[in-house]
Amino acid sequence: MPVKPPIFWKDRDEILILDQRKLPRKEQYISCKNIRQVINAIKKLAIRGAPAIGLAIAMGLALEAQRLQAKNIGEFVRKFDKLCKTASTARPTAVNLLWAIERMRAVIIENPEADIEFLKKSLWEVSEKIREENIVLDAAIGKHGEVVIEDGMNVLTYCNTGTLATGGSGTALGIIRTAWRKGKRIHVYVCETRPLLQGGRLTVWELLNDNVPMTLITDNAAGYLMESKIINLVIVGADRIATNGDTANKVGTYSLAVLAKENGIPFYVAAPLSTFDPTIKKGLEIPIEIRDPREVTHVNGKKIAPDGVNAYNPAFDITPSKYITGIVTENGIARRPLSRSLRQLLIKH
Ligand code: MRU
């Protein structure tokens, strides 16, 4: 049974978001009738994963545009721009959020003579286009990336990069799915991904749905498995990639990359080109989201740390490009030296 889409239109005035905080125990939907509710769902991680965040904000803007009251086009544009500004603060690291907002703003910029009704319709259509594109892009990433997985390999992955994170077959998980569907006998090792367990709750749920053989491990076990020659390949997703190939992804990715290099294991990143940030040259310029310390001190709403304990909760880290074997995109695989190879793939974009 295919995994349900993370977000969809119920009607032109209502979006439903599958609440990923409740998975896999409960399949519960959040009804959003305005952009404030969509932004809240993004902030709280009810919907998450870089491409899904971009999609959600585009749909949220389209939803709110339908409700916008304006006496004239100037007022409509001013109000829409204000919405875009608010939307851009939902989460700081995944650049797909800003990319999707720019796609929506382009509708207004490219149609200076249009009337309000035309803009409302076009904004809705662009959000739908982004949703459809995510499916196509994931399929292309899967096709280009599956060649790095050989028959019989044990593949380690991190966080959740599947349908729940994109609306398509996924990026890193899409590659794994494609290899499996092509008949390659693979085994996937899924890191739990503390503190919010996107691996232990979401990725294993998706792989179980597809009957892909897999084993869940604690994040701290990854080094031991690599050193023991159990892992042949690592594939992860990305939230923002600098022009030199440095990559921001779920915190803990950097440690996996260093361990992979130390053990001679290829380390791949998979992401659509919308995850590249042409304005950022090096990874250390990428803003890293710092989340509520309670995500560390509490599990499932239950406190596990003693009272008075300080916790620090960066949600992402930066993997320098020197640790990355290749970056799989919809236009092909960027190989080392990554900056040159990425430039060539972006030209095809
Ligand atoms: O905090 P999250 O769950 O949004 O973090 C998600 C990740 O780090 C993913 O690896 C990344 O967004 C890629 S999803 C295709």
Image (tube, grey):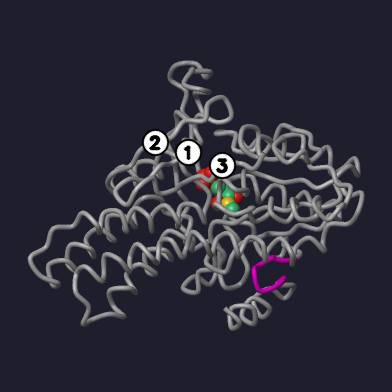
Instruction: Please name the residue shown 50% across and 44% down the image.
Output: 6
Q: In the image, is the residue at mark 2 within 8 Å of ligand 1 by its beta carbon?
A: no
271 w.r.t. 165: above or below: below
Secondary structure of the residue carrying tag 2 is: strand
Q: Residues within 10 Å of mark 1 (few under 14, many from 20)?
A: many
Viewer-proximal residue, 24 or 160?
A: 24
Dividing the image into 4 quarters, which one contains the C terminus?
Answer: bottom right
Tell whether 172 sits left or right of 100: right
Which amino acid, mark 1?
Answer: Leu
Q: Residue furthest left?
A: 71
Viewer-proximal residue, 110 or 343?
A: 110
Q: Residues within 10 Å of mark 2 (few under 14, many from 20)?
A: some
N-terminal-most mark, 1 or 3: 3
**Residue 4, which numbered label?**
3
The magenta-colored residue range is 326-333
How far apart are the two marked residues, 2 and 3, measured between alpha carbons?
Answer: 14 Å
N-terminal-most mark, 2 or 3: 3
Q: Is residue 249 visible?
A: no
Dividing the image into 4 quarters, which one contains the N terminus?
Answer: top right
Q: Residues within 10 Å of mark 3 (few under 14, many from 20)?
A: few
Residue wearing tag 1: 18
> Which percent across, then down, holds residue 200?
65, 33
How far apart are the two marked residues, 2 and 1, measured between alpha carbons?
Answer: 6 Å
Residue wearing tag 2: 30
Asked if marks 1 and 3 touch (Cβ < 8 Å), the reply is yes
In the rendered image, which quarter is residue 36 located in? top left
Secondary structure of the residue carrying tag 3 is: loop
